[in-house]
């Protein structure tokens, strides 16, 4: 028979019940024994007053002619419940056995009175307190006793009340523990059910954040980030598998065809040279495509292997623009800084500077290339949560019917035949942006230009939260 493992929800419920029961039991016991102790002390104080009264009354008499055994005296004023008052002459031999048998009080009680001057005793029903006093050169003992109705009746009622309250508290604590544990684990169970629905066919699904649950939302954000990387990896794989055979076969077919033609008959040195130049050109194309495939694969599979630092986006943009101008002096780039925030810390993001440089450079370079080196406007702005880069050109744009294919590796729009390229810049940039928990949005109209918006989460909001905490 398989062992049944207790779930965390059940463990939490049991733990809460144990805590509640322990606290309730300790509290109930403390209240009960505090009241019992107080009632005992208070009743002894009343008896002590009665004993003192007995002594004063006896001393007020002209003489005390008591036999050596004992006498009984009752007070005439208000008495305690079932009060019994005693006055004994101390035997000359200090032997209290006869008196002890008569009044059913241990002789040690009398000896304690003689030794200490005062003592108390109870037999769970009657309470006794005694004092020794001296009168006319003789020693006497005065004892007051009574039944503590408060302990017998009222504390009994208190005990029953506390036990009833404890039983009801335990019952309600069970209900509360069950409800609380169910409430605590409800978001986790909901997340677990959602995770079970996610597979390679629907990696676009994401976990929804839970209101007022910071710790769980951090886990959800981490999981969603992981899903984004996995989704990017799967998309990259699917695109590569769908395009790699065609893209690699074309230059290989040209190389093999040229080599086969060259070897079919004897040719002149000039013809061999021309054939080798064609083969070299196709081999270079093949090499570039293989490098592009490896680069896309690297950014699609594991972004965590890259070094992560704090990057200032404004500094990154200046560096990208300077690099692009060095590569091609025709590149006409205008950086609009009118939307820069007052606090430069809002421009900091967490990421890999080289990869971010590569992504931004690809976007801006495409704008320059496909606009025939007209001016490309790059705008930079930030909020408390995000940094935005907007790249706008007035180039050839992208046909509306082909917009859904722009992220496919090696896809090139139908109006780009006169421009050099391999169709990897935009897919590569999107992979990099996704690795940095960002977003890339492209809007374009044919012959009207293209606008690309890049959004990255800033670390400014995180820093503010850390300071507040």
Image: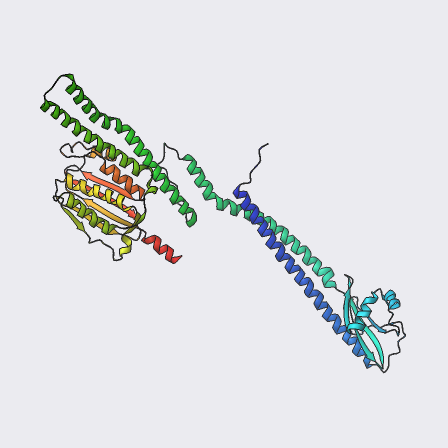
The reply to whether residue 408 is visible in this rendering is no
**Towards the viewer: 302 or 73:** 302
**Residue 398 % position (x, y):** 18, 36
In the displayed image of the protein, which residue is found farthest to the front?
269
Scheme of colours in the image: rainbow
Marks counted in the figure total 0
Q: Is residue 197 left or right of residue 17?
A: left
**Towards the viewer: 438 or 152:** 438
| Quadrant position of residue 83 | bottom right
Q: Residue at x 57, y 46 (%)?
A: 14
**Residue 7 % position (x, y):** 53, 41
In the displayed image of the protein, which residue is found farthest to the top?
265
Q: Residue at x 78, y 62 (%)?
A: 123
Q: Is residue 269 above or below residue 6?
A: above
**Towards the viewer: 169 or 14:** 14
The reply to whether residue 65 is visible in this rendering is yes
**Residue 155 % position (x, y):** 70, 60
Q: Quadrant of the C terminus?
A: bottom left
**Towards the viewer: 27 or 219:** 219
In the displayed image of the protein, which residue is found farthest to the right?
67
Q: Quadrant of the N terminus?
A: top right
Q: Residue at x 22, y 38 (%)?
A: 425
**Residue 344 % position (x, y):** 26, 56
Q: Is residue 232 left or right of residue 35?
A: left
């Amino acid at each position: 028979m398989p062992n049944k493992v207790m779930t965390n929800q059940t463990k939490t419920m049991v733990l809460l019940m144990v805590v509640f029961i322990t606290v309730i039991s300790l509290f109930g016991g403390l209240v009960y024994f505090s009241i019992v102790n107080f009632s005992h002390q208070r009743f002894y104080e009343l008896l002590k007053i009665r004993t003192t009264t007995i002594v004063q009354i006896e001393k007020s008499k002209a003489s005390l002619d008591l036999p050596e055994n004992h006498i009984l005296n009752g007070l005439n004023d208000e008495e305690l419940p079932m009060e019994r008052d005693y006055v004994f002459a101390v035997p000359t031999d200090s032997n209290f056995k006869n008196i002890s048998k008569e009044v059913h009080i241990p002789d040690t009680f009398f000896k304690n009175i003689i030794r200490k001057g005062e003592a108390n005793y109870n037999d769970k029903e009657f309470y006794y307190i005694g004092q020794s006093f001296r009168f006319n050169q003789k020693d006497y003992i005065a004892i007051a006793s009574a039944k503590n109705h408060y302990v017998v009746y009222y504390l009994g009622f208190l005990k029953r009340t506390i036990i009833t309250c404890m039983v009801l508290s335990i019952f309600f604590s069970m209900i509360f523990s069950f409800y609380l544990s169910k409430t605590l684990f409800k978001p986790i169970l909901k997340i677990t059910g959602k995770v079970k629905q996610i597979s390679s066919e629907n990696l676009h699904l994401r976990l929804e954040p839970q209101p007022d649950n910071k710790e769980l939302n951090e886990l959800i954000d981490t999981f969603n980030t992981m899903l984004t990387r996995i989704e990017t990896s799967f998309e990259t794989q699917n695109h590569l598998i769908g395009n790699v055979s065609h893209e690699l076969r074309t230059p290989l077919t040209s190389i093999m065809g040229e080599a086969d033609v060259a070897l079919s008959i004897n040719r002149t040195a000039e013809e061999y040279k021309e054939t080798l130049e064609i083969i070299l050109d196709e081999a270079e194309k093949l090499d570039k495509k293989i490098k592009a495939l490896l680069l896309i694969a690297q950014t699609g599979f594991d972004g965590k292997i890259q070094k992560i630092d704090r990057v200032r986006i404004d500094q990154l943009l200046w560096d990208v623009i300077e690099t692009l101008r060095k590569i091609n002096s025709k590149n006409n780039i205008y950086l609009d800084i009118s939307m820069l925030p007052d606090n430069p810390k809002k421009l900091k993001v967490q990421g890999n500077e080289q990869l971010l440089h590569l992504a931004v450079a690809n976007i801006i370079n495409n704008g320059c290339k496909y606009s025939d080196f007209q001016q490309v406007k790059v705008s930079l702005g930030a909020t408390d949560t995000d940094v935005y880069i907007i790249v706008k050109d007035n180039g050839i744009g992208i046909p509306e019917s082909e917009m859904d294919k722009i992220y496919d590796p090696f896809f090139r729009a139908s109006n780009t035949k006169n421009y050099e390229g391999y169709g990897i810049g935009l897919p590569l940039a999107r992979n990099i942006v996704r690795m940095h928990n960002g977003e890339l949005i492209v809007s374009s109209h044919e012959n009207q230009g293209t606008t690309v918006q890049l959004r990255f989460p800033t670390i400014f909001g995180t820093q503010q939260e850390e300071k507040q905490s």
